[in-house]
Image (cartoon, rainbow, N blue to C red):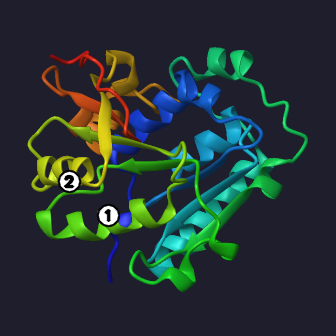
C-alpha cells in the first residue's frame, strides 16, 4: 500500500507557515483554494484557519490518505487552533471574519489528476492552487502541468509551490513547461529561517529532528514559488 500521504512532509510545514505569514491575506471571501497531493493536509487546514477563503478543497487519491485527511479535518474543526512558532501571533493578526465555519468551507476530495470526473463539481475553476514538494521525478511533470492548466482560473489564478532547494528531479522541466504555457514564475524566494522552525507543540528539538530532520539542517533551504499567467518576472529574493 502507498503510505506516502500518511506522513508529514517538511515542505508542507514550510507552506503552512507561508500561508499563515502572508498568503492568507490573498485568500479573500470570494477565493477558492485547492491543495494538490495534500497528504496530511496541513497547508489546506492552514488556509481554512487563517484565511477568509470561501472554499478550501484538500485533495489526494489513495483511500488511506483520504480517510486520514477526513480525520484531520474533523479534529481541526473540533479544535480550530494551530499553535507553533509564530502561529499564535498570526492567529491574532489574521482572525477569520468569514461567516462560514471551517467545517462548511473545507471539503476533502479523492481526486485523480487524469480523471476530470473527480475534479470539483460544476467545472469550478480554482483561484489559488497549493502544492508542496509534489515533483520528485520527471515523470510527474506532465500530470502536474495538466492539472494546473485544467483547474486554475484562467484570468487571475495563482499556483503557490514549495520545494527544497536540493535539485528535485523534474522541477526545472516543470517550470520550463509552465513557461511555455504562458506562466511566469514571478517569485522564487528562499523561505525565511523561521518557516523551518520546530513545529511541535512540546518544543522538543530531538523529537523534531527525528521526524523532520530534512528541514532542520543549517544548510537546509526551501524555495517559495509563485506562478502566474503572463506576468513580468520579479527579481528573485534567493539570487
What residue is drawn where x is 23% and y is 68%? 142
Residue 119 badge? none
Q: Residue 144 shows which numbered tag? A: 1
Q: Is residue 106 above or below residue 238?
A: below
Asked whether residue 134 is in view, the answer is yes
Residue in view at x 12 percent, y 23 percent: 219
Tell me residue 105's x, y (percent): 77, 54
- Residue 126, how many percent across, how many down? 58, 55
Check disc 2 and report its element: helix, strand or loop: helix
Closer to the camera in the image, 99 or 154: 154
Near-viewer residue (203 or 141): 141
Q: Which residue is at 75% across, 43% downward?
A: 30
Judged left or right of residue 231, residue 155 is: right
CB within 8 Å, label 1 to label 2:
yes
Q: Residue furthest right?
A: 99
Location of residue 34 (image quadrant): bottom right
CA distance for labels 1 and 2 = 8 Å
Secondary structure state at the residue bearing disc 1:
helix
Q: Can you see residue 6?
A: no
Mark identifier at residue 174:
2
Q: Position of residue 106 (x, y in %)?
A: 71, 57
Say which quadrant the C terminus sits in: top left
Label 2: how many residues lie within 10 Å, few (<14), some (14-19) or many (20+)? some
**Location of residue 20 (image quadrant):** top right
Badge 1 crowding class, 10 Å Cα cut-off, few under 14, some 14 to 19, many 20 or more, is: many
Looking at the rendered image, the quarter that the N terminus falls into is bottom left
Left or right relative to 30: residue 115: left
Q: From this view, report whether residue 108 is shown above or below residue 159.
A: below
Q: Residue 149's quadrant in the figure?
A: bottom left
Amino acid at each position: 500500500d502507498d503510505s506516502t500521504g500518511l506522513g508529514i512532509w517538511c515542505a508542507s510545514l514550510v507552506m503552512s507557515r507561508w500561508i499563515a505569514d502572508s498568503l492568507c491575506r490573498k485568500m479573500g471571501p470570494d477565493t477558492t483554494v485547492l491543495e494538490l497531493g495534500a497528504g496530511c493536509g496541513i497547508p489546506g487546514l492552514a488556509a481554512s484557519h487563517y484565511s477568509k477563503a470561501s472554499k478550501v478543497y484538500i485533495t489526494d487519491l489513495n483511500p488511506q490518505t483520504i480517510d486520514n485527511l477526513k480525520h484531520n479535518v474533523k479534529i481541526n474543526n473540533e479544535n480550530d487552533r494551530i499553535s507553533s512558532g509564530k502561529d499564535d501571533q498570526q492567529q491574532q493578526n489574521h482572525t477569520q471574519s468569514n461567516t462560514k465555519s471551517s467545517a462548511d468551507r473545507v471539503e476533502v476530495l479523492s481526486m485523480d489528476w487524469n480523471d476530470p470526473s473527480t475534479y470539483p463539481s460544476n467545472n469550478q475553476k480554482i483561484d489559488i492552487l497549493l502544492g508542496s514538494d509534489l515533483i520528485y521525478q520527471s515523470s510527474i511533470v506532465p500530470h502536474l502541468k495538466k492539472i494546473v492548466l485544467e483547474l486554475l482560473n484562467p484570468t487571475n489564478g495563482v499556483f503557490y509551490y514549495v520545494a527544497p532547494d536540493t535539485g528535485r528531479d523534474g522541477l526545472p522541466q516543470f517550470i520550463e513547461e509552465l513557461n511555455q504555457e504562458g506562466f511566469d514564475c514571478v517569485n522564487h524566494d528562499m523561505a525565511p529561517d523561521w518557516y523551518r522552525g520546530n513545529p511541535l507543540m512540546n518544543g522538543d528539538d530531538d523529537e523534531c529532528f527525528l521526524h523532520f530532520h530534512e528541514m532542520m539542517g543549517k544548510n537546509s533551504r526551501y524555495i517559495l514559488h509563485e506562478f502566474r499567467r503572463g506576468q513580468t518576472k520579479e527579481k528573485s529574493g534567493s539570487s
